[in-house]
Amino acid sequence: DVVLTQSPLSLPVTLGQPASISCRSNQSLVYNGGHTYLNWFHQRPGQSPRRLIYQVSKRGSGVPDRFSGSGSGSDFKLQISRVEAEDVGIYFCMQGTHWPNTFGQGTTVEIK
Amino acid sequence: EVNLVQSGGGLIQPGGSLRLSCAVSGFIVSDNYMSWVRQAPGKGLEFVSVIYGGDNTYYSTSVRGRFTISRDISNNTLYLQMNSLRPDDTAIYYCARAGPTVSTHFDCWGQGALVTVSA
């Protein structure tokens, strides 16, 4: 199975400041047709995951534009331009290029 | 409006069986890839199973041979039949739409159902 490694695992942030999470894969996530299936999710305590980003950099419906995704091949990043209080929780990356789909171990974002 | 409503979780003894349901509104289950994902207490997310097309299925190695994913077209519901349950199957189980397009890849999730396997 493809292994996704996130860093950092814990990220204390200051409100209004930027934040960045890395996700690295042990295999290329480029599919045969040239597309890369890498998603980012946010999960608040006691809630289901919510998809933020799909196909590396596309924002899901209703996702604020302070969230952005970037990267290629096996190295990806989620960035929050200005952290708000509602952004606390756990962030997961997930690859959909290879079966089974696999997830990163999660990054916990908390306010300093 | 898209909605996935789960039911069927609970406490079960090791070796027992349980069936989870995921009733979908807002899209047709059989026209989409549908998946089950689980999250052990305090842990990350783990793919369990997916169903797509003409009843094609795929399972993680940890549940293959014990769990069965299925769907009912008449009531637009996804199921997960779990047999020979083990304590390490204890988790919140989520249903989610998993495709077929990239824009629908894990774009909506159920509220989760807690399964606790314990004597």
Image (cartoon, coloured by chain):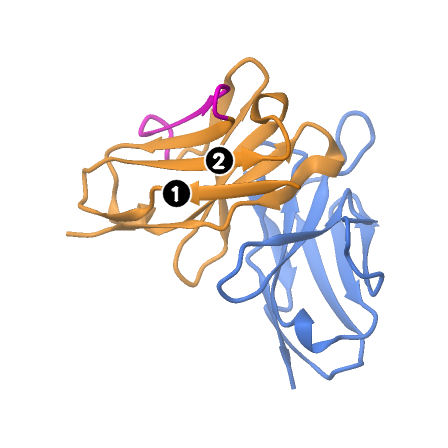
| Residue depicted at x 45% and y 34% | B60
Percent across and percent down for residue B20 are 37, 37
Q: Which comes before the other along the chain, label 1 or label 2?
A: 1
Quadrant in which the N terminus of chain A is drawn: top right
Q: Which chain is blue?
A: A
Name the amino acid, label 1. Answer: Ser
Tally the marks. Answer: 2
Determine whether the residue tagged by mark 1 lies in a helix, strand or loop: strand
| Residue depicted at x 70% and y 47% | A39
Direction from residue B19 to residue A10 in the image, left or right: right
Question: Badge 1, how many Cα within 10 Å: few under 14, some, many 20+?
Answer: some
| Residue depicted at x 76% and y 75% | A83
Determine whether the residue tagged by mark 2 lies in a helix, strand or loop: strand
Q: Which chain is orange?
A: B
Query: Where are the magenta residues, as a range?
Result: B62-75
Of residue A84 and residue A71, the one placed in the foreground of this image is A84
Percent across and percent down for residue A62 are 77, 54
Of residue A8 and residue B55, the one placed in the foreground of this image is B55
Q: Label 2 marks which chain's residue?
A: B
Q: Label 1 marks which chain's residue?
A: B
| Residue depicted at x 58% and y 48% | A103
Quadrant in which the C terminus of chain A is drawn: bottom right
Direction from residue B4 to residue B65 in the image, left or right: left
Q: Which mark is residue B23?
A: 2
Q: Which mark is residue B7?
A: 1
| Mark 1 touches mark 2? (CB < 8 Å) | yes
